[in-house]
Image (spheres, grey):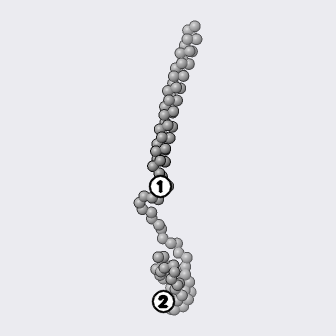
Amino acid sequence: MPTYEYECTKCNHRFERFQSMKDEHVKRCPECRCKVQRLIGTGAGIIFKGSGFYQTDYRSKDYHEAAKKDTSAASAPAASDAKSAATTEGKKEATAAKKSTA
């Protein structure tokens, strides 16, 4: 249930009422019994506690398994690329050494 803030149009008395949204609005000031105006409040901050508030909390087991496969597959070619680059460079050096001695 929300808290509504009211202000009297005559005596400027401000007060709050904790009431349901279905309840009828306060119409009279408790001090002078004149008309009141409901003020627009900023509302309260919402605090989310616990799990279940992030997109990743609802991922399926299949998704997590596929993500693990993708990560391991992505890291494996990078390692083999580094090895093949080293062997290719080694072959180039060997070829250059043969040409320089010949």
50 lies above or below 19: above
> Which disc is residue 100 wearing?
none
Q: Where, quadrant-wise, is the C terminus in this rendering? A: top right
Give me the C-alpha separation between circle 1 and circle 2: 50 Å
> Which disc is residue 58 wearing?
1
- The crowd level at tag 1 (other Cα within 10 Å; few <14, some 14-19, many 20+) is few
In the rendered structure, which amino acid carries the disc numbered 2?
A: Pro
Question: Looking at the image, which residue is at 47% across and 55% down?
Answer: 58
60 lies above or below 42: above
Q: Of callouts 1 and 2, which one flags the residue occurring earlier in the amino acid sequence?
A: 2
Q: Is residue 9 left or right of residue 15?
A: right
On the image, the x and y values in percent for residue 63 come to 49, 48
In the rendered structure, which amino acid carries the disc numbered 1?
A: Tyr
Question: Looking at the image, which residue is at 55% across and 79% down?
Answer: 39
> Which disc is residue 30 wearing?
2
- The crowd level at tag 2 (other Cα within 10 Å; few <14, some 14-19, many 20+) is some
Question: Looking at the image, which residue is at 54% across and 22% down?
Answer: 88
Residue 48 visible from this viewpoint: yes
Question: Looking at the image, which residue is at 54% across and 91% down?
Answer: 34
Closest to the observer, 51 or 11: 51
Residue 10 visible from this viewpoint: no
Closest to the observer, 65 or 15: 65
Total number of numbered discs in the rendering: 2
Provide the secondary structure element on which disc 2 rests. Answer: loop
On the image, the x and y values in percent for residue 82 come to 51, 29
